[in-house]
Image (cartoon, rainbow, N blue to C red):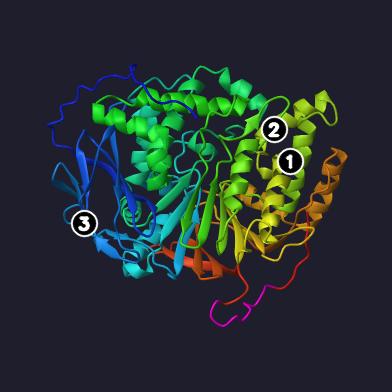
């Protein structure tokens, strides 16, 4: 593990602690258990933050101030309104807020769970709507939620990547960048450093609907490529090229430092926080009145170096949350890659060993949250297999160079482009399905985003498992989907395209996969949000799309419903399965 003790290099703060602080962002409800909820805030000055009598002092990073309050000692299955105070001044809820009061809720045993999820959410200033964006699905969900009783609100929201876009900035962010530096040299109008990352988060999370939703629904998050840059960690050659630029070092250090603060910290449970060396060091820095930026930048640099084969220093972005009897394992498929000349893996051996440990145990439902889909459209899967083998030299160095160009141009970088890792994850899921890692769960699903369309697929293995394994993809929450992308993914699901692409993979000497899968529904296009409803050992998935009707407010329309488990807890009656379809791989 990294040693974050001893901070002689830290810079002493000069802020006046007597100044009245204001709320910049938040509150965000983060990790929830049946007796606790953590609450994250950003303030404009050092202060003490109070939520229901539990307090925390802010810590500082590059002049920005943050706090994470652990509200513990709560009763399971209860809800209560809450306020946020900064140095005894109430700052939340805001005066004259049009939204219902903010509520802390804890799950109860036997409680029906509702989890919503999606990925790829560009911030929502009016300029984006004018550029042809359809309504923001999460905004629209928040507007509907504000009309409902808290008992109908979701228990958690899983944000599966691209919470911010560091490489495709909005007009508002570009204005901020122009005010700070010249934009006629790299990285031009892309985000360059930590300070510009803070502007991205402020733009995204200050949206009034999103701010109120995140103040009432606990959230879990993981990054994807656009949180740093398109094609982030695609290949060894990509790493060498980007590391030779003048701007990359500042970008990756700023990106991972801000990610730890804004996203990762709130993913950790109170018990994890109590043992986390980084959090303990940052909190100690805050108590001492010194800037914690050097600590976090050291962690960011160490984490980034692991991709290049540096020894594992204990930096893990993946994590596990148990919502009652539902286990959610959130997997880092970006920063945790191994990209050396001799090794290529979606996750290191140490990370796969950790993942296998998380799959052990007794739970009713297993949700594996991976920003990148495990099961892709059949033809695209074979093309990514073909491309990876080609880039590795299976057909000579000349075609390897051409393959690298194709890989970056076509974003061929999903699980299918890491064939050995794809098969390894499949073996682990098959073991869970067969009851080889503990009592057999009622359902298993991989939750993903990234690919700007939604679908449901069902995997099968040899030897077969008893618990069905699904791939549920929901993307985007708020983005545009060009017609060419729609056409590509639609064709990618066709049997004809699969029949053409499969021989390409075989020609490149790709072994036949042990995994097969059936497309149950999709592809669906538009801005969408997925919902999982879990009642005992019964689980169902629904997909809603945000639509705008002229003259009326945006609304959500259900476009798919899929049962994920096959027996009702009370009656033991089977849930009607979908008609069988041909399996392809």
- Residue under label 2, please give it: 344
Residue 531 pos. (x, y %): 49, 63
Q: CA distance from mark 3 to mark 1?
A: 52 Å
Q: Is residue 369 visible?
A: yes
Residue 128 pos. (x, y %): 42, 46
51 sits to left or right of 393: left
- Residue under label 1, please give it: 420
* SS under mark 2: strand
Q: Quadrant of residue 189?
A: top left
Q: Quadrant of residue 78?
A: bottom left
Can residue 570 be found in the magenta stretch? yes
Q: Residues within 10 Å of mark 3 (few under 14, many from 20)?
A: few
- Residue under label 3, please give it: 97
Q: Residue at x 57, y 17 (%)?
A: 244
Q: CA distance from mark 2 to mark 3?
A: 51 Å
- The stretch of residues the image draws in magenta is 569-578
């Amino acid at each position: 593990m990294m040693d974050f003790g001893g901070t002689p290099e830290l810079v002493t703060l000069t802020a006046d602690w007597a100044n009245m602080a204001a709320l910049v962002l938040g509150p965000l409800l983060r990790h929830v258990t049946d007796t606790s909820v953590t609450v994250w805030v950003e303030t404009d000055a050092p202060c003490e933050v109070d939520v229901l009598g539990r307090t925390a002092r802010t810590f500082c990073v590059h002049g920005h101030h943050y706090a994470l309050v652990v509200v513990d000692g709560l009763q399971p299955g209860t809800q209560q309104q809450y306020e946020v105070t900064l140095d005894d001044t109430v700052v939340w809820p805001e005066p004259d807020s049009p939204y219902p009061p903010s509520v802390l809720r804890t799950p109860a045993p036997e409680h029906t769970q509702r989890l919503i999820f999606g990925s790829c959410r560009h911030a929502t200033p009016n300029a984006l709507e004018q550029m042809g964006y359809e309504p923001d699905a999460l905004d629209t969900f928040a507007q509907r939620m504000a009309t409902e009783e808290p008992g109908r609100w979701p228990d958690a929201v899983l944000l599966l990547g691209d919470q911010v876009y560091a490489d495709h900035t909005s007009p508002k962010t570009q204005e901020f960048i122009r005010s700070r530096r010249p934009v006629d040299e790299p990285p031009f109008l892309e985000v360059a450093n930590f300070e510009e990352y803070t502007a991205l988060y402020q733009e995204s999370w200050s949206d009034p609907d999103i701010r109120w939703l995140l103040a009432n629904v606990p959230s879990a998050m993981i990054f994807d490529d656009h949180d740093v840059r398109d094609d982030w960690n695609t290949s060894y050659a990509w790493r060498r090229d980007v590391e030779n630029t003048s701007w990359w070092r500042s970008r990756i250090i700023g990106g991972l430092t801000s990610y730890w603060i804004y996203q990762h910290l709130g993913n950790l449970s109170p018990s994890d926080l109590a043992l986390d060396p980084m959090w303990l060091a940052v909190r100690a820095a805050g108590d001492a009145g010194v800037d914690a930026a050097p600590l976090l930048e050291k962690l960011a640099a160490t984490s980034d170096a692991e991709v290049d084969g540096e020894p594992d220093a204990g930096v893990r972005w993946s994590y596990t949350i148990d919502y009652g009897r539902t286990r959610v394992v959130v997997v880092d498929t970006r920063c945790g890659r191994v990209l050396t000349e001799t090794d290529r893996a979606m996750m290191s051996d140490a990370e796969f060993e950790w993942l296998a440990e998380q799959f052990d145990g007794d739970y009713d439902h297993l949700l594996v949250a991976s920003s990148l889909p495990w099961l892709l459209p059949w033809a695209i899967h074979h093309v990514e297999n073909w491309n990876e083998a080609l880039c590795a030299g299976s057909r000579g160095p000349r075609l390897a160079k051409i393959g690298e160009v194709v890989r970056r141009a076509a974003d061929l970088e999903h699980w299918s482009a890491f064939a050995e890792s794809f098969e390894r994850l499949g073996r682990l899921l098959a073991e869970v399905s067969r009851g080889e890692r503990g009592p057999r769960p009622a359902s298993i699903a991989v939750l993903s985003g990234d690919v700007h369309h939604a679908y449901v697929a069902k995997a099968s293995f040899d030897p077969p498992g008893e618990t069905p394994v699904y791939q549920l993809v929901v993307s985007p929450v708020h983005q545009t989907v060009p017609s060419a992308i729609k056409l590509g993914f639609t064709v990618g699901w066709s049997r004809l395209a699969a029949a053409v692409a499969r021989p390409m993979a075989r020609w490149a000497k790709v072994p036949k996969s042990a995994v097969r899968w059936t497309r149950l529904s999709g592809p669906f296009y538009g801005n969408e949000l997925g919902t999982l409803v879990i009642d005992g050992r019964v689980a169902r998935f629904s997909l809603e799309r945000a639509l705008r009707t002229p003259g009326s407010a945006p609304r959500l329309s259900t476009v798919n419903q899929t049962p994920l488990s096959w027996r009702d807890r009370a009656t033991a009656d089977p849930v009607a399965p979908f008609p069988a379809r041909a399996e392809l791989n």
